[in-house]
Image (cartoon, grey):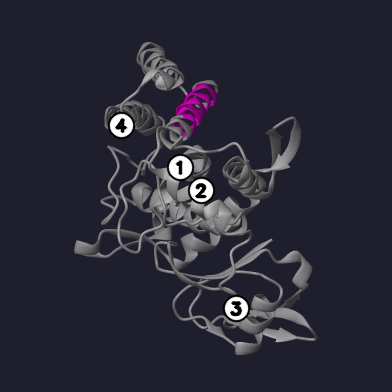
């Protein structure tokens, strides 16, 4: 279970050896330590040092988030989940063609999941069949291009191609996704900071919930989230998270469409802050957090078994760590 405290005045403490969570003005409840996998705290939440000590002792990360749900910092033991050999190999991997080939696989999965979302939406909502078939054909072509990435010999050429393919796929995908969005919501393209409309604010918040989950998975696997591959190194930015999040973004997009189209979330769930754009409001956050956590906890078929979606992130991080740990991985030979 991931615990989110996103309301001003909420409290996190310890009672009888368990975490004690109390929203402002509501009854508190105790949570068994063994059930808590991560804790997310936003501005205005009170927390006791006993709770922080218990989290550190039990290796449970406590993540601080901003108003968009993005991680701004965390409390943890300072110990990675595995030996330093992995991170030494990771530094080499990030500069080598092998690393880019790995990212090509991630982006291929991203495009494949975009295509799957479009196929499911076209069965669920009325669409313009001709334009949707054209869009899906573009995505299928991008997937095939990613499969051919192994033919590249020059790192910079492949980087340019990967960025171009990803941009083309996402542009067509978002265009079709916006066409099924029901009023009063509209979506004419991505706007991040600020979000120019409520739907973009919703996407920003859902993506923001995904980022720390990916970062935590990398750290548990012994990987350095700040050593990216395709994304250029930026000071104090978890660039590997930006690479690794791609195969999971479609979860956020699916939940966003469903929340808006089934009436669970209305415009009253958002705040217009003028020059700062639209933000998800307190009432909207409660609905969104509950819906997305339930979606992440639901099992789907993955690697031959039914597994919780949230577990997919951990498994992918562990798989990358295992690849880097292999004795025959010597990228510069």
Dot 4 falls on a residue whose secondary structure is helix
* Foreground label between 1 and 3: 1
* Foreground label between 4 and 3: 4
Q: Tell me the residue at 40%/31% (across/down).
A: 177
User: Of callouts 4 and 2, which one flags the residue occurring earlier in the amino acid sequence?
Assistant: 2
> Mark on residue 167?
4
Residue that carries the numbered disc 3 in the rendered image: 23
Dot 1 falls on a residue whose secondary structure is helix
Q: Tell me the residue at 46%/34% (across/down).
A: 333
- What type of secondary structure mainly makes up the magenta span? helix
Magenta-colored span: 105-120
Q: Is residue 57 above or below residue 290?
A: below
Evaluate whether residue 127 shows in this view.
no
Residue that carries the numbered disc 2 in the rendered image: 89
The spot of residue 24 in percent (x, y) is 57, 82
- For label 3, count other residues whose C-alpha is less than 10 Å away and answer few (under 14), some (14-19) or many (20+): some
> Mark on residue 323?
none
The spot of residue 289 in percent (x, y) is 55, 58
- Kindly indicate whether the residue at mark 2 contacts the one at mark 1 (C-beta within 8 angstroms): yes
Residue that carries the numbered disc 1 in the rendered image: 93
- For label 1, count other residues whose C-alpha is less than 10 Å away and answer few (under 14), some (14-19) or many (20+): many
- For label 4, count other residues whose C-alpha is less than 10 Å away and answer few (under 14), some (14-19) or many (20+): few
From the viewer's perspective, tell me whether residue 323 is left or right of residue 175. Answer: right
Q: Gap in Å between the C-alphas at discs 1 and 2?
A: 6 Å
Mark count? 4
């Amino acid at each position: 279970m991931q615990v989110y405290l996103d309301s001003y005045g909420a409290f996190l403490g310890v009672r009888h050896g368990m975490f004690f969570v109390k929203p402002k003005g509501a009854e508190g409840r105790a949570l068994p330590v063994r059930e808590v996998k991560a804790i997310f705290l936003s501005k205005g939440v009170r927390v006791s040092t006993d709770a922080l000590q218990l989290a550190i002792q039990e290796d449970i990360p406590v993540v601080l988030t901003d108003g968009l749900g993005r991680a701004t910092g965390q409390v943890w033991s300072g110990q990675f989940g595995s030996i330093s050999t992995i991170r030494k190999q990771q530094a080499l991997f990030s500069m080598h063609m092998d690393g880019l080939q790995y990212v090509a696989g991630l982006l291929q999965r991203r495009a494949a999941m975009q295509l799957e979302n479009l196929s499911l939406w076209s069965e669920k909502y009325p669409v313009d069949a001709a334009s949707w078939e054209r869009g899906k054909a573009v995505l299928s072509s991008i997937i095939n291009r990613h499969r051919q990435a192994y033919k590249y010999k020059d790192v910079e050429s492949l980087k340019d191609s990967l960025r171009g393919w990803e941009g083309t796929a996402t542009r067509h995908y978002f265009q079709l996704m916006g066409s099924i969005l029901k009023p009063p919501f509209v979506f004419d393209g991505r706007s991040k900071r600020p979000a120019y409309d409520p739907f973009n604010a919703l996407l920003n918040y859902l993506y923001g919930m995904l980022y720390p989950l990916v970062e935590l998975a990398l750290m548990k696997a012994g990987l350095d989230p700040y050593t990216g591959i395709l994304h250029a190194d930026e000071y104090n930015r978890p660039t590997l998270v930006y690479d690794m999040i791609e195969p999971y973004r479609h979860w956020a997009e699916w939940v966003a469409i469903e929340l808006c189209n089934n009436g669970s979330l209305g415009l009253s769930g958002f705040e217009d802050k003028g020059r700062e754009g639209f933000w998800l409001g307190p009432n909207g956050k409660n609905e969104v957090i509950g819906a997305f956590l339930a979606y992440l906890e639901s099992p789907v078929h993955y690697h031959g078994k039914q597994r919780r979606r949230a577990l997919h992130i951990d498994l992918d991080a562990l798989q990358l760590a295992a690849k880097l740990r292999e004795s025959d991985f010597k990228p510069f030979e």
